[in-house]
Image: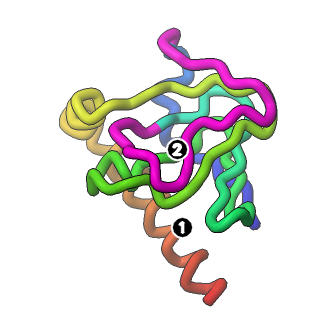
């Protein structure tokens, strides 16, 4: 299991519109509706699938992007591992970022591709 950190998602490093989470606090759960994704500004988040940690996401990393993109229920549960500051990205903000910062869209696609490869490798 790797810790995912994406330095390319640094567009949020100075963001002041973040949500704070304490260690052990649930950010979202498997099956929940997903209308936002998150960028980790500070701290780390554990991602669980079927009760098993499949990823730990650190500063600059993203989570919840699949539900935002395909509008289906969350496929994982995210829990703050440490004190966290997460920037909330709704669909409108996401679309604006993709239009204004094409590199952002590329980073999101890279994260999704990496996660898919990791899941395939685990069989």
* Image spot of residue 57 (x, y percent): 66, 47
Residue at the (56%, 47%) spot, across then down: 29
Query: Which residue occupies the extreme top position in the image?
Result: 16
Give the CA distance from mark 1 to mark 2.
11 Å
Residue at the (52%, 35%) spot, across then down: 39
- Looking at marks 1 and 2 on the same chain, the residue that comes earlier in the sequence is marked by 2
Q: Is residue 93 left or right of residue 30?
A: left
Q: Are marks 1 and 2 in contact (CB under 8 Å)?
A: no
Q: Nearer the viewer, residue 52 or 54?
A: 52
Q: Is residue 43 left or right of residue 94?
A: right
Residue at the (62%, 85%) spot, across then down: 121
Mark 2: few, some, or many residues within 10 Å (few <14, many ≥20)? many
* Image spot of residue 11 (x, y percent): 45, 28
Q: Which mark is residue 104?
A: none
* Image spot of residue 111 (x, y percent): 49, 58
| Magenta highlight on residue 108 | no
Residue at the (53%, 17%) spot, across then down: 18
- Where disc 2 sits, the SS reads strand
Q: Is residue 119 left or right of residue 84?
A: left
Q: Nearer the viewer, residue 55 or 106?
A: 55
Mark 1: few, some, or many residues within 10 Å (few <14, many ≥20)? some
Residue numbers of the magenta segment: 16-37
| Magenta highlight on residue 22 | yes
Q: Which mark is residue 115?
A: 1
* Image spot of residue 99 (x, y percent): 19, 36
Q: Quadrant of residue 36?
A: top left
Quadrant placement of the N terminus: bottom right
Query: Which residue occupies the extreme front position in the image?
Result: 31
Q: Which mark is residue 62?
A: 2
Compared with 16, 20 (above or below) is below
């Amino acid at each position: 299991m790797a810790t995912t950190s994406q330095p390319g998602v640094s567009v949020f490093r100075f963001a002041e519109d973040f949500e704070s989470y304490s260690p052990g606090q649930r950010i979202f759960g498997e099956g929940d509706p997903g209308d936002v994704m998150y960028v980790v500004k500070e701290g780390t988040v554990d991602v669980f699938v079927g009760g098993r940690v499949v990823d730990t996401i650190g500063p600059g990393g993203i989570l919840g992007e699949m539900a935002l993109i395909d509008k289906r229920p969350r496929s994982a549960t995210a829990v703050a591992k440490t004190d966290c500051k997460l920037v909330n990205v709704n669909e409108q903000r996401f679309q604006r970022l993709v239009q204004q910062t094409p590199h952002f869209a590329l980073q999101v696609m890279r994260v999704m591709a990496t996660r898919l490869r990791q899941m395939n490798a685990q069989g």
